[in-house]
Every structure is written in C-alpha cells, then in structure tokens.
Image (tube, rainbow, N blue to C red):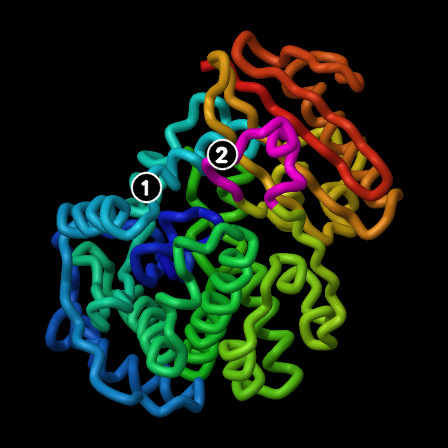
C-alpha cells in the first residue's frame, strides 16, 4: 500500500506498503521456510522473478533494477516514525485526529497516530520506498505470502517508473478524498496484478487483504480497506474498458474523488461534477479567523461514517449519495474553545436532506441527545450546531480545551 492513503496520512506518506493478502495474516517470526524456486535464496529471492511477472502482466517494461532489502519489525517501526517526523507537514496527524474525532470517524479517546503505527506493524508484509527506489520485505513474512507481497510491491515500483508516486501522493495535498482516490487507483492496480498472477499460476482465489483488524474503529477500518476493495473493483472496470492499457492511461489521468472510484462510469465518461467549498466559505472564516488545517472527506468517508449507525433507517449509500464536495477546517483555540467547521455540498436539496437526517440520527443515537437547530452540548467538552440550507449542510463542532 502507498503510505499516504486513504486520508490516513500515515499510509500515503512513507512508501508503498502491502497488507498481507491471501487470508493468511501472521507468521511465526524466524520461521521463513524455503519453498520452491521463489524462496530458494531467502526472502529477496522472489524479487527478480516477481518483477518479471508484474512487468509481463502489466505490459510495462521495467526501466531498471529495484533492489530488495529485508527489514525487521524494529527497523520498519523506526522507518515509520522517522518518516512521520520528517516527511509529513507539522501537526498533520494531530489535526486529522481532531477532525476524525469531531465528526465521529473515530472515538473521542482513540489515539490516531499510535493506532496507525500499531496497525501497520501488525499487517505489513513489505513496502516499496519511492524515495530510495527499493523494495523492502518484512523479515517475518511467511513463505506462502512472499510471492504475492513481491508482485504487489514491484507493481508499485513499475508505476513509479512511469509516473511519480511521491508527486501523485503528496502528503501536502489538503484534499484527503483526492488522495484516497489516487491510492485506490494505485492499490487496485497492484491488487489486480496479484490476483492475475495467482490465477495464472495456481487458479486459486484469494482475498484482497487481511481484514483481521479488531482494534481499529469501524469507519477507519472501512477507509483503510477501501483502496483494496473498491480500488480492485475500479481497476477491474477499467480492465473491461481497455485492458491494462486503460489502467496505464488512468495513472496519467487519475480519478480525483472517491465518488469516481465508487461509480467508475462517471470517471470513464468524465461526467462527475465537483464543487469543493472554498476555504473562505467555512463558518469561522466569516468571524475573522483562519483555519490551521483543512481537508476534504469525500463520499466514501461519509458513507463509512454513516455506516456506524446500526439502526439502518437510512442506508449509508443513500445518505452519502449525491455528494459533490465538502471542506472541513480546524480553527485555533479561542476563549478555551476550538471550532471545527464542516461544509458539505450535494447535487440537490433532496440529497442534502438525506445526509442531514442520516447524520442527525447517528449523532442522536451516539450521544443520546435530541438535536435541533440550536447549539447543543453533546458531551462536557463537545458541542454541536447542525443546519441545512438548500443543497448545503453546515456542521460546527466546538471542543473545549
């Protein structure tokens, strides 16, 4: 996976990571068995043949060798922490934590940064580093997964040789939904290549990624898996409309929203309309303040958020359908209170009403409070104002510091 995914800044920023595919998730450390030709010379023995396999399937000639190195859990953890410190804009993960806690994507007490690091250390199988241009295999990777990990990551290496992955997945991009769409394209392509390789070799089916993520909040888990699940569906749709050449074209002209990934016909016909609010349209800016951080959540993140409402009165797909744009801003603390302002735009007033009702119902169920047009205190430190006007819904959270 490319480490600046999904709105999960950590995922996209540090390289290309492979979650352990094929339903097998954890290996006994130190028990890497030699297995057939792929494993005869150790963990990196798979790399050269995997590059040839990926190149053959993708129809992309490798422009040069991609060195393979083996790293321990401690080395990979240090790599993650160093990258976060050196590559991400200052305080970005902290700002994302504020946003995700405010809107309800994660619980108010969830440690976002540490949760992500722990998650990826438990799931990582290897990664491609687009800065050093090498492929890293985790030293605890079981033999039965090494081939798939290598093919996946070396597909990323091929992508990087034809487009600039660091530029495409720039962590300085303040549109997380766009980064999520880019990640879905990149991961969907690599995952499709894995499945194609396995089908040709063994005719056995496999899962896209390990879904054994019990400690991860439900909405965050959905976003994490999006590049693999929906990215794979998107890649397959492109494949049906022109083979791998069509995927290569998409790498040069990528989708810009998760909506296009969810609805590939809109991407293929170039008919999707985007109306991302400008920064100055956020509540708070009109009061003379400037946000410290802003982001765009997008259709899928809204769908994942609404999925946390177990009542099922309005499906998440209905509540998120018709999204055309949103922007959320984190404002500086004023009078011991921080404002998080979120403005969403919809295709019609009906679409806006569906989101408004679904989100209102979710918040009422979660906090046990009846929400009206007036400001309401959800918890001792969290208050809310929720309003709708035409095809726009405005949400203001106030967090006591």
**Which of the 4 quarters of the picture holds residue 237?**
bottom right
Q: Nearer the viewer, residue 31 or 233?
A: 233
Residue at image point 78% right, 40% down: 392
Q: Is residue 117 above or below residue 379?
A: below
Label placed on residue 74: none
Secondary structure state at the residue bearing disc 1: loop
Q: Is residue 106 left or right of residue 130?
A: right
Q: Nearer the viewer, residue 389 or 160?
A: 389
**Which of the 4 quarters of the picture holds residue 305?**
top right
Q: Nearer the viewer, residue 29 or 349?
A: 349
Question: Is residue 290 inside the magenta stretch?
Answer: yes
Residue at image point 43% right, 22% down: 109
Q: Earlier in the sequence, mark 2 or mark 1?
A: 1
Expressed as whole percent of the image width and height from the top left, the position of residue 288 reads: 58, 29
Expressed as whole percent of the image width and height from the top left, the position of residue 51 reads: 29, 82
Q: Is residue 69 left or right of residue 117?
A: left
Q: Residues within 10 Å of mark 1 (few under 14, many from 20)?
A: few
Label placed on residue 90: 1
**Which of the 4 quarters of the picture holds residue 375?**
top right
Q: Main secondary structure of the magenta part?
A: loop
Position of the C terminus, as image quadrant, is top left
Expressed as whole percent of the image width and height from the top left, the position of residue 236 reads: 59, 74
In the orientation shown, which residue stands out farthest toward the top?
Answer: 380
Does residue 301 appear in the picture of this structure?
no
Q: Which residues are magenta?
A: 279-294
Question: Is residue 285 inside the magenta stretch?
Answer: yes
Residue under numbered circle 2:
217
């Amino acid at each position: 996976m490319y480490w600046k995914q999904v709105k999960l800044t950590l995922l996209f920023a540090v390289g290309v990571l492979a979650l352990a595919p094929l339903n097998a998730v954890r290996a006994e450390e130190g028990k890497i068995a030699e297995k057939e030709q792929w494993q005869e010379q150790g963990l990196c023995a798979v790399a050269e043949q995997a590059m040839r396999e990926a190149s053959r399937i993708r129809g992309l000639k490798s422009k040069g060798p991609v060195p393979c190195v083996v790293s321990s859990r401690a080395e990979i953890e240090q790599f993650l922490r160093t990258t976060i410190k050196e590559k991400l804009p200052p305080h970005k993960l902290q700002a994302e934590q504020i946003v995700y806690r405010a809107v309800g994507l994660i619980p108010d007490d969830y440690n976002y940064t540490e949760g992500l690091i722990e998650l990826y250390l438990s799931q990582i199988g290897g990664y491609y580093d687009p800065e050093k241009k090498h492929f890293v295999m985790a030293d605890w990777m079981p033999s039965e997964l090494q081939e798939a990990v290598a093919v996946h990551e070396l597909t990323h290496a091929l992508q990087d040789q034809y487009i600039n992955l660091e530029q495409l997945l720039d962590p300085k991009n303040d549109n997380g939904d766009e980064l999520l769409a880019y990640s879905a394209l990149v991961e969907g392509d690599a995952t499709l290549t894995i499945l194609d390789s396995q089908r040709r070799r063994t005719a056995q089916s496999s899962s896209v990624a390990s879904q054994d993520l019990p400690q991860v909040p439900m909405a965050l888990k959905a976003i994490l898996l999006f590049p693999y699940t929906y990215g794979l569906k998107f890649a397959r749709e492109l494949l049906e409309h022109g083979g791998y050449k069509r995927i290569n074209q998409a790498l040069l002209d990528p989708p810009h929203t998760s909506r296009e990934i969810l609805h590939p016909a809109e991407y293929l016909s170039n008919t999707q309309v985007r109306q991302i609010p400008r920064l100055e349209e956020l509540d708070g800016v009109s009061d003379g303040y400037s946000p410290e951080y802003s982001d765009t959540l997008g259709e899928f993140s809204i769908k994942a958020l609404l999925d946390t409402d177990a009542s099922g009165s309005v499906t998440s797909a209905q509540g998120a359908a018709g999204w055309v744009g949103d922007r959320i801003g984190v404002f500086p603390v004023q009078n011991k209170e921080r404002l998080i302002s979120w403005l969403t735009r919809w295709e019609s007033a009906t679409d806006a009403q569906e989101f408004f009702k679904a989100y209102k119902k979710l918040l009422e169920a979660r906090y046990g409070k009846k929400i009206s047009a007036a400001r309401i205190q959800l918890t001792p430190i969290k208050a809310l104002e929720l309003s709708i006007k035409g095809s726009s819904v405005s949400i203001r959270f106030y967090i006591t510091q």
